[in-house]
Image: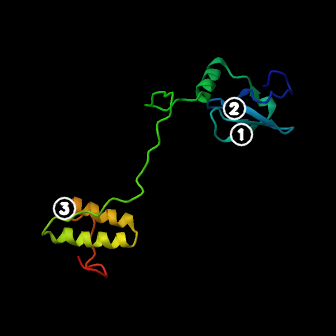
Amino acid sequence: MCDDSGSVPDLGTYMAADIPGASPRLGRVTAWDGELVHLERPGGGAAWTAVPSALRRPTGDESALIRVLTTPVAAAGRAHRARPEPPVVLPAEPLPPAVPTPGCPTCEFAAAWERNALRRHDHSRAADFRVEMRNHPHTRPKLPLPEDAPAGRRP
């Protein structure tokens, strides 16, 4: 169905192929290997092939759809900025250890485990115990505490 029988569309042009019982398939010509035309979907996606005689020029509505699919869209919710935002600088040092509530055995126990995790440079586990102390008192602990105290120094 190419405009000229036996002609191959130019590289970079958009073509359409009619599919029985479905919407036409649209694609940009990327290569021709002598028998098949290789096409890429508008806006990216899986490549596909067709014989040149099965291709036709897109209609006006199909060309409009191709323009929509290939036009870049600015990020939603962001205003255009003349200058980029400054980078976020995170502190190199971790947060200081949490202070347990005086007289609360659960908080003191979590504080001991937090100190143990910090000595082992396990800052993720230390943060878990810090969150547990911050959320105390509560009916059910968010983090099940180990049964025994950490080895080494006692609180």
- Left or right: residue 147 versus residue 79 is left
| Furthest residue in direction left, as rendered | 103
Crowding at label 2, few (<14), some or many (≥20) Cα neighbours within 10 Å? many
Distance (Cα) linking label 2 and label 3? 60 Å
Q: Quadrant of residue 100?
A: bottom left
Colouring convention used in this rendered image of the protein = rainbow
Does residue 151 lie above or below 115 as drawn?
Answer: below
Marking on residue 143: none
Distance (Cα) linking label 1 and label 3? 60 Å
Q: Amino acid at mark 2?
A: Gly
At which x and y percent is residue 123? Answer: 38, 65
Does residue 32 lie above or below 114 as drawn?
Answer: above
* Mark found first going from the N terminus, 1 or 3: 1
Marking on residue 136: 3
In depth, the one of 152 and 104 nearer the eye is 152
- Please tell me which residue is depicted at 28% across the width and 75% down the height of the picture: 146
Numbered disc 2: secondary structure: strand
- Please tell me which residue is depicted at 62% across the width and 33% down the height of the picture: 43
* Mark found first going from the N terminus, 2 or 3: 2
At which x and y percent is residue 148? Answer: 26, 80
Crowding at label 3, few (<14), some or many (≥20) Cα neighbours within 10 Å? some
Numbered disc 1: secondary structure: strand
Kindly identify which residue carries mark 2. Answer: 27
